[in-house]
Every structure is written in C-alpha cells, then in structure tokens.
Amino acid sequence: MRKISLWLFILVFTASLSRAQDDATQQQIDKLSGQIQDLLDAQAAQGKRIDALEKQISDLGDKMNQPGGGSFASADDLKNLAAQVQEIDKKRQDDNQKILDALDKLGKGGTVSTSSHRPTAVSTTTPTDNPTPPSTGPQKGYEYEIKSGDTVAAVAKAYRAQGVKVTTDQILAANPGLNPKNLIVGKKIFIPDANAK
C-alpha cells in the first residue's frame, strides 16, 4: 500500500507541477500576445499618419501645378509690376516738378496755394504791422486766414517750412483770446516773424 500511495503522491505532485508550468507558460503567452497587439496598433496608427502625409504632399503638388500656386512670378506678372512702377515713378516726377515750380514761384515773391486742409504759408515781401500788437509793442509778421482743418501747430509748422522762425506759443501770445482748440474758419490771425525788419 505504501507503494501505491507513493505512486499516487508522485502522480499528484507531477500533475500539480505540470499545471504550475502550464500557468506560467500561459502567462508568458498572454504577455507576448499583448505586446504583439500593441505593436500592431502602433503600426496601424503609423500607417494612417503616412497616408495623411501622402495626401498632404499630393495636395501641395496639385497647388504648385495650378497657375499662380507657386511662389514664382510669371512674365506677365513682372510686366504688370514694371508698368505699375513706371506709373508711380511718373507721378513722383510730376509731383517733384510741381514742388520745384512752387519753390520757384515762392522765390520770386509769389504765393502758393495748398489744399484746404493744410495751412497756407503766405510769404509776402513786406510784412505787415500787427493790428493788435502784444504788450511789448508792434511786431512785424504776417496775416493768416484760418482754413478748415487748421491747427495752431500746423500753421506754425507751415510757416517754419517757409523760413519764418515761429512757435506755437509765439502765435498764441501774438493773438490774445485765440482758443487753439476752437479755431474759427475765416478768422485772420497774426503770425509774428522775429527775422522781419
């Protein structure tokens, strides 16, 4: 009976040992199956990205083949651009000539009219006496009629451009009661000129 129980014990032990090895083997197989599935999923995701990149490359190729899709100018584009540059240059030359004519006229003692939104800097050959002189006594200068859009600073700047050394403060001092924030169109103001003799 001892032999039978020994054999029975060996058989049970071998069977349990065999099951333990089967369980370990099964765990390794499951682990490898999971890793293989992860690799297959990653490969599928890369395949989708490659397909998307191929589509983008194809779309870019189509855009490059369309007229005007490239970054290069055609001969017609260059001709149009050259014509526009020539037109702008002609206008620039015309404007330059107008400026030279105006300077000539000013040099001869005439007046030049500018747009109604800019002050007209009048350069007369004989400055007028100030009809309402400041308390320091009579000054020499110019009479200026305010136009729409004028500011005291713009008027002073225009006269300085004509060679008259005058500041905004000097204009305000020479015209008591003048409100620089509310200039009345058509009102005449006095522009003092320290250089006038």
Image (tube, grey):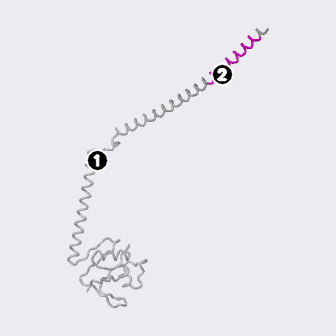
Give how far across and how far down residue 131 sits, in percent.
Answer: 33, 88
Question: For residue 102, which quarter of the picture?
Answer: bottom left
Amino acid on which disc 1 is placed: Asp
Residue to which mark 2 is pinned: 23
Q: What kind of secondary structure does the magenta stretch mostly adopt?
A: helix
Secondary structure of residue under mark 2: helix
Label 1: how many residues lie within 10 Å, few (<14), some (14-19) or many (20+)?
A: few
Query: What residue is shown at x 33% (from left), y 91% (from top)?
Result: 137
Question: Of the residues tagged 2 and 1, which is closer to the observer?
Answer: 2
The part of the chain drawn in magenta is: 5-27
Hey, which quadrant is residue 96 in on the image? bottom left
Q: From what the image shows, is residue 134 above or below residue 62? A: below
| Viewport quadrant of the N terminus | top right
In the image, what residue occupies the spot 42% across and 37% down? 56
- Give the image location of residue 166, x and y in percent: 32, 80
User: Is 56 in front, or is 67?
Assistant: 56
Q: Which mark is residue 77?
A: 1
